[in-house]
Amino acid sequence: MKFLILGAGNTGKAYSAYLLSKGQEVTLYDRSLDRLSSLRTQNLKASGVVSGEFSPVLTNCLDCAKDSDVILVCTVAEGHRPLAVALKGALAPGQLVLVTNGCWGAVEFDQVLGEEADRKGCILAETGGQLILCSSPAPEEVYLKTVKQTMPLSCVHPQQTAAVCDRLKEVFPQFVPGDSVLDTSLNNSNPMIHAPLVLFNATRLENGEDYLLFGTGVTEKVARFVEHMDAERVAVVKACGVPPRTELEMLNAFWPEKQPTLLDVLHKTPAYQVTKGPKTLNHRYLSEDLPYGLAPYLILARRFGIDTPYMETLVHMLGLYMGVDFLTLAPDLSTVDLARYLPDARSF
């Protein structure tokens, strides 16, 4: 298959190496020439679960979008809508557009490209999180720490989901059908854990300290706070007509060894035991997981009259700390037709 990867950051480079190692054709796009510059003169050097040197085709122009079978959107959440706008009129019949980190990406793409996608027989979809945990030791390098064993995938039109998972199973056997794109965005494990860890370790980030995110960064009380937040999230998910999964269930699904408590899964999972915490407040744990993760829960909670004191307090505190109103940056879900994305008629 021919893949166009949008975004040459950590995730885009990781997907490039992963797919090229499986014999797929890859074009890597980024609007920033600076981000692509090192890869124009050197091969992409991958280490970890994928090792070797790879040469994706590089471009900073979306004219090539029509030549791909699958478009993987690997940008941060704030880049979803601008990319959807940039792709308007450029989709080829039968293409799959897959947003690789949920965060309401499929809904935003549908709002911009839904009519064109339906007319051209294209499919808009998203995953419920990042499949590959990765980092970039240098601009021309990527370290693939691990690949999760399962990851839910959902399509804007739920009846298409099973066929898409089957279409991709040769290269992505980890993808399993999700209930809907509401499922993959609402049952997203990242905001529930990342945002509290930022708040309770904020001075570590500001000071650039070296620490283990899920080790020293998570105490028993922090884990308990996350569990209270997650109970609020589960109530919102149910109100949206989506089968909820708890934070513990989602994290356990990623890894072969299951743990009995949230604290156990964060302290005992091998991948988490070596995960370093961010050393700056300029991080997607704030810029993505607050406006595109937690804030949408609050918008929907208010829509359904659900009390969410833990989430409200966390978003408010981090907003005051950063001087940012995260709710104003969130996707507008106050009037979105949730029933459009569900596989059957469910009442709210």
Image (cartoon, rainbow, N blue to C red):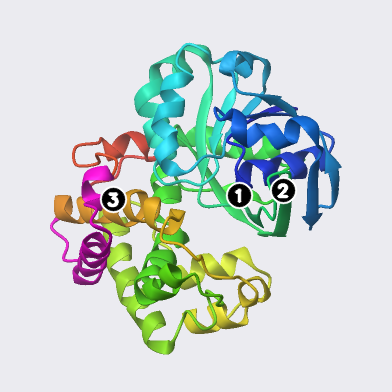
Residue at the image point whose x is 38% and y is 65% from the top: 195
Q: Bin the neighbour count of mark 3 within 10 Å (Cα to Cα): few under 14, some 14-19, many 20 and up.
A: many
Amino acid type of the residue that numbered disc 1 sits on in the rendered structure: Val
Of 148 and 14, nearer the camera is 14
Residue at the image point whose x is 38% and y is 46% from the top: 182
Q: Bin the neighbour count of mark 2 within 10 Å (Cα to Cα): few under 14, some 14-19, many 20 and up.
A: some
Q: Specify the label residue 176 is tagged with.
A: 1
Q: Write down the quadrant of residue 74 in the picture.
A: top right
Q: Which residues are magenta?
A: 305-329
Identify the residue under disc 3.
296
Identify the residue under disc 2.
173
Amino acid type of the residue that numbered disc 3 sits on in the rendered structure: Pro
Amino acid type of the residue that numbered disc 2 sits on in the rendered structure: Pro
Mark sitting earlier along the chain (3/1): 1
Q: Are marks 3 and 1 in contact (CB under 8 Å)?
A: no
Residue at the image point whose x is 46% and y is 81% from the top: 218
